Amino acid sequence: MYNILMLDDDQMMIETISPLLLHSGLNIQHIFSANTFSQGLDYIRDYDIDLLITDLEVEGLDRIYDMQQVKMINPSIEIIVVSAHNTFEYAQAAIRLGVKNYLIKPLDLELFVDSVREVLLHSTISRPVIEHVNWSHCNHFQMQRHPIQKHIKLNQLFASNGYVPQEESEYRSLGLQGPYYAMIKIQYQPLTANQMTLTVEDQYLLNYAVMNLAVELVHNQWNSITFETDECEINMIIQWDETSYLQGWHHKIRQLNQLGQLLHSHIDHYLHIPNVIGISQILKGYEFINQLNIQAHQALMWHTQYPDHHVFYYGNMHWKKHEWIEVSESKEGKNTYNLIVSQVKAYIEKCYGQKGLTIHDVAKKNHVSPNYLSYLFKKTTGFNLWEYVIKLRMEESRNLLLETDLRRYEVAERVGYESPEHFSKIFKRYYGISPSEFKQLQA
């Protein structure tokens, strides 16, 4: 389990980011926060911190050079810098000092959470090493296709607005036990004489051939579920329980890449079919099942940019150019995104006054992951999702202060805040004056 320290004097930033990280699919034990560099060093000395996320403007921090002091206390700690300084010199110096990523404020929350995932998944913190994986073929076996109803449900599960089981038992009935999951997506291009369209029977047999090869390759080596999408595409879900994941967890990404390379080469060599492999990150929890599909699909899109490569891991690609976003967003896809955002806005406008409301709650109600929802919402509306919630809450609280005699704590309750003090702090940050000062101006 991971311990994260957030070093930033912007409390609103910490309050926005912490829930995202806790619901990111990573096995996070605790998120600590500090407002000064000296407080941060105390946490690093007293706790086993895996990742430090730090602003450069924190009190007592001598820019990025104090990172050396952090590394002396805990040599294995990973560091992500978030900064308003968009200069090459700062970023270059940060990389020289072992900083894993240098992100510019205001943060793109989707990219930020993916960066945290990638740093932690690739960290070199000492853990038990997994036994060597034997990639040789196993004894011959007969693959059984999924019953048609299971096949349909598996496909519906990964649709953008498809089937969402309400009970854990429904996931288990599909073979999904986890709690850690990754997806490998195999996309192939059948070669037919004179570019003739494949018959339904031909497509059926071709899917079976690719699936059979894929399943045989992982048989007795991985806990996996493989199913077809009827679109020259095969999905493979790799899953781990707690024990097997923690045994050599930091080798899992490398092994997924090895498996991707083997899948590509075997399909190419034995079936003579051009194919591309997309690999997702490893995420924890049923609620991120659909996110795996999105990541694997986006990894595949990089083949349009790099046609000489055939195996793409989402975590490697996401930090370079982002043309794949535009490539992958067809008119139909954009309509779907707009529909999701419209539904989310309607839900927020109805429920923003609900106490304890989180981005995770909003995402779950609308059947998408929190990180993907944050990305879609910002891209479509220009607002960060939680900024939109605060906007609605502040506008309503202003109206209540103007038009009613409600006390501060009553207004706070009406707009979803447990603490009147926290409400006052947000109100003053938003309007520049406190609720009581605002009330006095209207008298």
Image: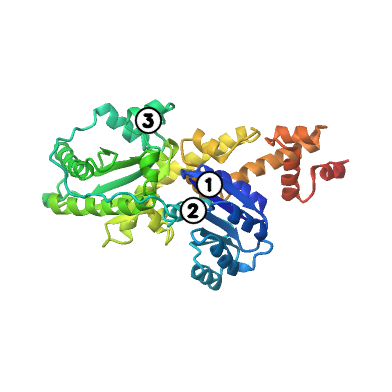
At numbered mark 2, what does the secondary structure look like: helix, strand or loop? Answer: helix
Labelled disc at residue 21? 1
The disc labelled 1 sits on which kind of residue?
Answer: Leu
Q: Can residue 134 be seen at all in this image of the molecule?
A: yes
Residue at (39, 33) in percent of width and height: 162
Query: Residue farthest to the left?
Result: 193
At numbered mark 1, what does the secondary structure look like: helix, strand or loop? Answer: helix
Residue behind mark 2: 116
Residue behind mark 3: 171
Residue at (47, 55) in percent of width and height: 115
Q: Earlier in the sequence, mark 3 or mark 1?
A: 1
The one of 188 and 266 positioned closer to us in this rendering: 266
Residue 85: horizontal and vertical position, in percent? 59, 67
The disc labelled 3 sits on which kind of residue?
Answer: Tyr
The relative height of residue 62 versus residue 235 in the rendered view (above or below) is below
Q: Are marks 1 and 2 in contact (CB under 8 Å)?
A: yes
